[in-house]
Amino acid sequence: MVSVAALTGFLSFVLGYLVVRRDPSSRPRQAFLLMSIFLGTWAVIAVPTLSTGDLSAFRRLFLIGSLFQLLHFGSFLHFALAVTETTPRRYRLVYFIYLPCVLSTKLFWFHDDYVCDFALVNGTWQLNHQYGSAAFFSMLVIWFAYYVPAGIVYFRRGTRSATVREKRAFHILGASVVLLVIVTFLEVLVVPLLFRVPSRGTVLLFKFVWLLCFAYLVDRFQFLTAPPRLEDIALISFPGYVLVIVDHQRKVYRANEEAARFFEAPGESLPGIGIDELFPGGTHLCQLIDSRSDAGSASVSIVLDLRNHATSRGLLDTKVSALRDKNGNRIGYVFIARPVFNGKRTDITAGITRREVEIIEQVLTGRRNSDIAKYLSISERTVKTHITHIFDKLGIENRIQLYALLRDNHFISSHTADCHFVRSPDKVSEN
């Protein structure tokens, strides 16, 4: 059992790392990480617990391990709710499921009748649970209260799944929970009562089996460890629009025929190249998408000047958006652009400072002076002064003329986006 506990702890931490490393912001991955941490800690504590020969030390370690065992119950249901998308609208409310786990530890710390009458047989402790104790009854109730709903939500999610792949994955998860409940119930309660033998504490072995079941899902279905594959995204011609799909490494994954014609390159040669080779400042645009996503913004637009770029000539009205899966996790970026043919662009912003450009971009979003001042952390009087200087430099009198001037000179994108840029993104700082 010591070796099983050590192996369970090691695999639990490893699987937690493998699952969460792809996208730490994913709620299902965070829930699985909690589950793996609690199980791994419980297993690590079980190693000295099962190997010690001192009864008092064994009791203390066993009680500490019971705390993480209860927390693991909570994380087991937390993960089931997160991965099946059945969590409350206010996601933080899901953490209340841990409250009974924490409160129940009082029964274990102050009522140790649950762990009395141990026997050391062949160097292994046999746990003679006191089945009539309040602590054991509490453990049994909490165990059923967390594991049974977890199995139910897995099967329900599998029934509602639209694809055979998802149905199979969630049904396997549900079946594994049922098997885990049955085997654990037999080992902990039924067999000791029928045959008058103490429990050998092999629950960790069954947890280890469940982890192997999950590892099968990871290997067979790429479950949780990989986002939906970008190759599942189909591109059609989109006449008149350049469409490019970019992966997390900011490299082109796929481009449509219009993009190949515009950049005068064979379509098969575009995948794998850096996005900056097609769109100057493209990497910076992707970084802006990432930084703004937490605030709810996930798209930017700009008219890029490619006349001096190695790949093409002309203006490209570009919008960049985040690609997300159904769980809201970012899996890449999409660049959609429309060439501005026969468009001439006078650099009317040559005398405009960086701060004034930032204010122009805020004006384009329709924000009032007070909102701009708050966003840029400056006074409203300063905003008014900057706007006056902008009007003087451009020879205009109001915001309507500003918009018309930028539009006529192809500085304003026709795309709808959360943020509009006047200058190239690699020359503009984001506040």
Image: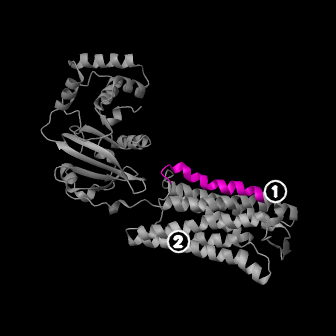
Q: Nearer the viewer, residue 197 or 13?
A: 197
The magenta segment is 88-107
Q: Is residue 82 visible?
A: yes
Q: Is residue 13 visible?
A: no
- Distance Cα–Cα, label 1 vs label 2: 35 Å
Residue 198 x %, y %: 79, 76
Residue 18 x %, y %: 54, 60
Residue 220 in magenta? no
Residue found 51% across the figure and 52% down from its top: 24
Which colouring convention does the figure follow? one colour
Label 1 residue SS? helix
Q: What residue is shown with label 2? A: 174
Would you identify the image quadrant in which residue 412 lies?
top left
Amino acid on which disc 1 is placed: Phe
Residue found 40% across the figure and 61% down from its top: 228
Determine whether label 1 and label 2 are within 8 Å by CB.
Answer: no
Residue found 74% across the figure and 60% down from its top: 65
Binning the other alpha carbons within 10 Å of mark 1 as few (below 14), some (14 to 19) or many (20 upward) gives: few
Q: Nearer the viewer, mark 1 or mark 2?
A: 1
Residue 172 x %, y %: 50, 73
Binning the other alpha carbons within 10 Å of mark 2 as few (below 14), some (14 to 19) or many (20 upward) gives: many
Q: Quadrant of the N terminus?
A: bottom right
Image vertical order of residue 316 relative to residue 207, above or below: above
Most common SS among magenta residues? helix
Residue 258 x %, y %: 19, 53
Between disc 1 and disc 2, whose residue precedes?
1
Amino acid on which disc 2 is placed: Gly
Would you identify the image quadrant in which residue 226 lies?
bottom left
Q: Nearer the viewer, residue 124 or 142?
A: 142
Residue 105 in magenta? yes
Q: Quadrant of the C terminus?
A: top left
Q: What residue is shown with label 1? A: 110
